[in-house]
Amino acid sequence: MKELTIRKEQPGDEKKIHALVEEAFATAERSDGNEQDLVDALRRSEAWISELSLVAVADGQLTGHVLFTRAEVSGETVLALAPLSVLPAFQRQGIGTALVREGHRIAGNLGYSWSVVLGSGEYYGRFGYLPARAFGILPPFDVPDRNFMALKLREDAPKIAGVLHYAKAFGIETPEEERKISESRIKSGKIRDARDLRET
Ligand SMILES: CC(C)(COP(=O)(O)OP(=O)(O)OC[C@H]1O[C@@H](n2cnc3c(N)ncnc32)[C@H](O)[C@@H]1OP(=O)(O)O)[C@@H](O)C(=O)NCCC(=O)NCCS
């Protein structure tokens, strides 16, 4: 790979992005097989931020894509990083890293304070992501802490606490009462995830 450019998705990229996400996840460790449809559904939704659908162009070919969309924690907007895709033939050459870093830079400049991701703790730890629970952000599903992570994008990020409410396209509902738990209840350690709320 001689030249790598990261740029915003442009009109006309949609079909290529769909195909590349599908190919990247076809051999992924974890996949529900619908990541490419999720991107299309998010593009049609209010969660879409056109500046934060980024593609990697390596030697003239679309080889990677990253998407950050709007999500919510206790009424505050946060970003959800998903999905991140690099074509198998181009993996382990720094393309994923370049996409994520550029996304963080743009997001911070746009004024977004937090990014949340579900994925490999090892991979996303490299960018400074920490278990989201440490910040008071809880997953809306049962998942090990190391796989549900958050990153502060700006020094002046406001404190937030609550259950992450994903955009509708993700198909993960967070009931209204679960969106309103207080920081103190989270910090008390009694609330581990959304299931505990249903039981208390
Ligand atoms: C995960 C993915 C985006 C990484 O992209 P990439 O361009 O290969 O990543 P980079 O080259 O920037 O970084 C590679 C490093 O990350 C590590 N890495 C890659 N995938 C990893 C994974 N799933 N878990 C842990 N570490 C991983 C590699 O060990 C590599 O480190 P090394 O080169 O020092 O050995 C890419 O492998 C991919 O598209 N996978 C399929 C889809 C997927 O699983 N997406 C992530 C969903 S959370």
Image (cartoon, rainbow, N blue to C red):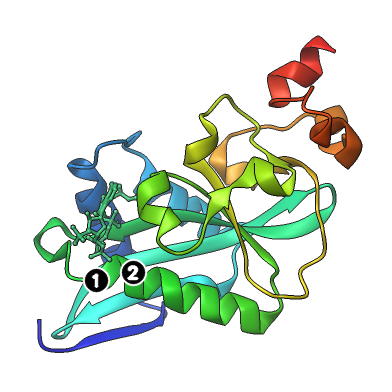
Is residue 148 in view? Answer: yes
Is residue 182 in view? Answer: no
Q: Residue at x 80, y 20 (%)?
A: 197
Residue 155 in the image: x percent, y percent? 71, 75
- Whether disc 1's CB lies below 8 Å from ligand 1 is answered yes
In the picture as drawn, the residue positioned furthest to the front comes out as 188
Q: Amino acid at mark 1?
A: Gly
The residue under label 2 is 97
Q: Residue at x 31, y 64 (%)?
A: 17
Placement of 78 over or under 195, stated as above or below: below
Classify the position of the C terminus by image quarter: top right
Q: Amino acid at mark 2?
A: Thr
Which image quadrant is residue 131 in? top right
Question: Circle 2: is it few (<14), some (14-19), or many (20+) Cα within 10 Å?
Answer: some
In the image, 149 versus 46, the foreground residue is 149
Q: Which element type, helix, strand or loop, lies under badge 2?
A: helix
- Whether disc 2's CB lies below 8 Å from ligand 1 is answered yes
Classify the position of the N terminus by image quarter: bottom left
Residue 80 in the image: x percent, y percent? 58, 55
Residue 26 in the image: x percent, y percent? 20, 42
Alpha carbons under labels 2 and 1: distance apart: 5 Å
- Left-right relation of 160 to 149: right
Instruction: Give the quarter the ligand 1 occupies.
Output: bottom left
As drawn, the label of residue 94 is 1
- Left-right relation of 20 to 126: left
Residue 64 in the image: x percent, y percent? 28, 67
Question: Circle 1: is it few (<14), some (14-19), or many (20+) Cα within 10 Å?
Answer: few
